[in-house]
Amino acid sequence: MNSFYDEFRIAVHSVWNRRWLALGVAWGVCILGWLVVALIPNKYESKAQIQVRTQSMLSSQAGFDPQMQRRDIQQLAQTLISSANLAKVVRGTDLGSTIATDQELAGKIEGLRANIEVKAEQDDFFAISAKQPSGKLARDVVQKLIDVAEEDNLAGDRKETSQTLRFLDTQIEARQKELAEAEAKRVAYETQNLGLLPGVGSVSQRMEASRAELSQIDSQLIQARSALAALNGQLAGTPATLNTPSMGGGGAPSALGQAQGELASMRARGFTDSHPDVVTVKNQIAALRSAGGGGGSSGGSSYRTPNPAYSSLQSMQAERGAAVAALQARKSALQSDMAQLAAKQTAEPGIAAEYQRINRDYEVLKAQYDKLVLERDQIRLRGQAETQTDAVQFRVVKEPSLSSVPAAPNRPLLLAAVLIAGIGAGIGSAFALGHLQTNFPTAAKLERASGLPVIGSISQMLTGEQRVERKQKMKLFYGASGGLVAVWAMLLVAEFIQRGLTA
């Protein structure tokens, strides 16, 4: 602790011995710094606050999506300081009075953008601030920026809506033509490949239906053939005629009359001569006639009559044979159709794939067309709502302020900083010079540096004249030091007086 205190005393003594150097450096740094601060131009700041409110009573069906409106409001901070808007601000204020070329305009725009700040706050509030060489110009810039933002929002939305509708109408017309061409192509392809396309009535479905029907016909044909075979066996064991004894010679004529009556009844019902029952009855009549003409009239004679059961079995045999023939013919027809379908089925996959491609293109075009029509209707409805209602409302919460106090630079703080920096530079230069010179402020330092014991030290002895001279120098030193602080105080007073005069 003692060594640190000794070092501190040595440093202070070293600086004090070179106090005039420190004071000169401090004066030089302060004067130079104060000149630099004086050359910094003043910038006055104007602030304003606006609120951008959206229409909340219109539903999203009218195209007013709350999230989209929120996104548009958030983009206001970015679009507000666009080059187009800043160019309007420059031309609408005193900034444009000295502009002669486009390069100058571009420079003014960049300088204005660097001095404008738009900050989004909560609840749709925006803070706008601008810094300019005068308070009036800063206020005019902020006011013009608010006016441009409001005009661009109202006129820009209508212009954007009109341009969007024109673009959508052009796209819808083009999609409509493409959709008509795709639909005509699909209809033509369907007509050309009728029966080969997937869906109801396709080759695959017809093939499956034919296989199912062929399976049923095979089953029915087996049953019909089995029934016919059984009927044939029964017919083979049934006699064609019966031996009927005559009863007093009146049996045959009575049977003949009965057969003739039955034939007349069949013809009355519309049976033709080729009908199996009609043929059977005719055979019975012919047999009865032949038996009646050649037989005796004795009571013990007999004659042969057709067997009705045999005739009935013959009729059933004819019906079963016709059914078997019909089923066989249907089976042959189905097999022929299936052969033709099998030949067509080899071309079906390629045709189906091409049809799917045509149908897919048509569906894509139709979906695009429907989406464009829906978007056009929504944008048209939104444009009408924005025209007839205030969808977005601007409200100036805080008018642009007019400041008489420059926002930048902070001269009192800069002047004090220059003073502190000058004093620090003077002390630092004196301290550095003390370390560069090869002298020893104390006997202990000399002993440590030389490695030899120091017997003693002699203090400086001043005469009376030297003491008087030292006192005068100290007065000059204190006066010069006080003068430095006095100059700083005068500069502060001048700064505040200038602000008061400006106000």
Image: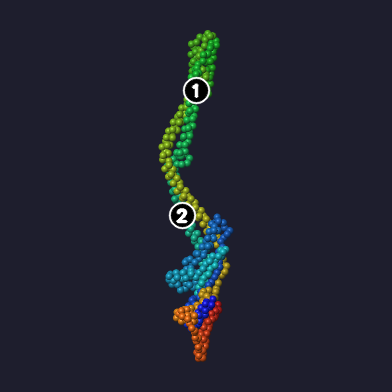
Query: Along the line of sight, which residue is nearer the eye, 489 or 223?
Result: 489
Q: Secondary structure at mark 1?
A: helix
What residue sits right under mark 2 in the picture?
Answer: 171
Q: Position of residue 29 (x, y in %)?
A: 48, 79
Q: Residue at x 50, y 55 (%)?
A: 376
Q: Residue under circle 1? A: 231
Q: Single out the mark in the foreground, 2 or 1.
A: 1
Q: Secondary structure at mark 2?
A: helix
> Residue 47 falls in which quadrant of the image?
bottom right
In front of the other: 111 or 495? 495
C-alpha distance separating marks 2 and 1: 79 Å
Above or below, comparing residue 14 to residue 297 in the picture: below
Q: Amino acid at mark 2?
A: Gln
- Identify the image quadrant of the C terminus: bottom right
Q: Position of residue 42 (x, y in %)?
A: 50, 75
Determine whether label 2 and label 1 are within 8 Å by CB. no
In the picture, the quarter occupied by the N terminus is bottom right
